[in-house]
Amino acid sequence: MKRSDSPSAAVAALAGAGLLAALLQTLVIPLIPAFPELLDAPPTSTSWVVTITLLTGAIVTPVSGRLGDLFGKRRALISTLGVATTGTVISALTSALPLMVIGRGLQGFAMGVIPLALGILRDRLPPHRTGSAIALLTGTLGLGGAMGIPLAGLVAEHFDWHVLFWGAAGLGVLCTLVIAAVVPETPRRSQGRFDVVGALGLGAGLIGLLLPIVNGGKWGWGSARTLGLAAAAVVILLAWGRHQLRSSSPLVDLRLSARRPVLMTNLATVASGFSIYTMLFVFPQILQAPPGTGYGLGQSLVRTGLAVAPNGVAALLVSPLAARMIGRYGARAAIMLGASLIATGYVFIAVQMTGVAQFVLASCIIGAGAGISVAAISKLITDVVPVTDTASANGVNNLMRSFGTSVASAVLAAILAQATVTAGGVTVPSEGAFRTTLIVGASAALLVVALSALVPTRTPPPGGSTQRTTRPLADRTGLR
């Protein structure tokens, strides 16, 4: 197959892969209430259909980034897409819980696409094009995440639910073929070997850490299982950190991660993941709640998805603006503005929680803020680390976002469980509890602003400048 040398085609292909990765994360959300019947299993077991994707995605993002830096980002990207596509085929062929969990676990590998795509963009594009390409990629992530909910609702209402996975499998095959055709391999590689012990230690530590966060509400926050896993995770991660500091070729460069620009940006990313996920967690519940609650809008699954979908559209539409803002005012200022918009959206809907139109408007405001802030965070991380560590650093940054999402899921569920009302024989969270979650989401966004303010304005990376000799590279690849 003859490979294209068009940079625009490469950017579009990588954006399509990012859309697939985000789509796979939200594709099953509308099916969660129906999974016990569809898979003939109790709800406590079917919850693994969602949990396993979160766990594998969290582990794969830093691992795939390191593999890409060592052995080639295009090769790692195609392999990652292949594993995720295999997972969608398994899910499309089964109605049994064990195989579904295996398939969804493999689909979590799609999250490894994001750091690899960001690394390829930095390696292959001249500096003046990198910002706009990163903004487009992060915008498609928002669009893919927002598309999953209404798309899944529409298919579930009118077709066999396996069609969702067949469609995702087809998109996975298409993305893999297009990337093979238009994305060239990156010549820059890190020196060293892959840290197998570090990867296993990180995986064990993250499983021990995330499982109690995700399931603490069901197990009991003070239960022996929750506390035991959390304690084991702390011990494992401390030992893992010691190993990383002593390794000559670590999976994660903790010394680089401890530098103030990287550390503050990653902490801001945790808060950003929390604040953005609040909308996806809270809005559908209010929109679908029965009107008898006094606040519920009684919307169908499809209508609820359509009300939330403008979030992703807004994130994509602001990507050119985000790129210009980053170029003119810097990534730090763009993060702060985007997070401020997110906080504004939550405050608005907390006060005006009266109709579908208000939720659509709030979705647009939050989506615009997310599109700007996520693009700026990715650009900032890309700029402050050495070229050979771009994918690894972005993998860790995406892990921080996943961690923030997991914490949000646990904290918001706990808040909603504290105050409930009964309407039509159904017990649902109270209006006050929902307003509290919205204020918590706004507070998380303001924390992003505060943490971003601590990022130095001038942050040259260690080990050399971010500026590259792009002329020889452009001569070889045609990416000008």
Image (spheres, helix red, strand yellow):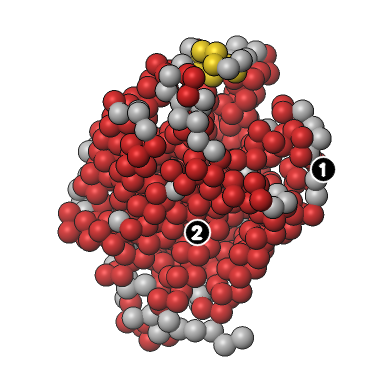
User: Residue 18 has which mark?
Assistant: 2
Quadrant in which residue 85 is drawn: bottom right
Residue type at mark 1?
A: Ala
**Of pointers 2 and 1, the one earlier in the residue sequence:** 2
Which image quadrant: the N terminus?
bottom right
Compare residues 202 and 214 and report the one nearer the observer. Answer: 214
Establish if 43 lies above or below 339: above
Residue at the disc numbered 1: 96
Do the numbered discs 2 and 1 sit on residues whose CB atoms are within 8 Å? no
Q: Residue at x 54, y 19 (%)?
A: 428
> For this view, does 53 lie left or right of residue 136?
right
Which image quadrant: the C terminus?
bottom left
Residue type at mark 2?
A: Gly
Provide the secondary structure element on which disc 2 rests: helix
Compare residues 28 and 115 and report the one nearer the observer. Answer: 28
Q: Is residue 360 visible?
A: yes
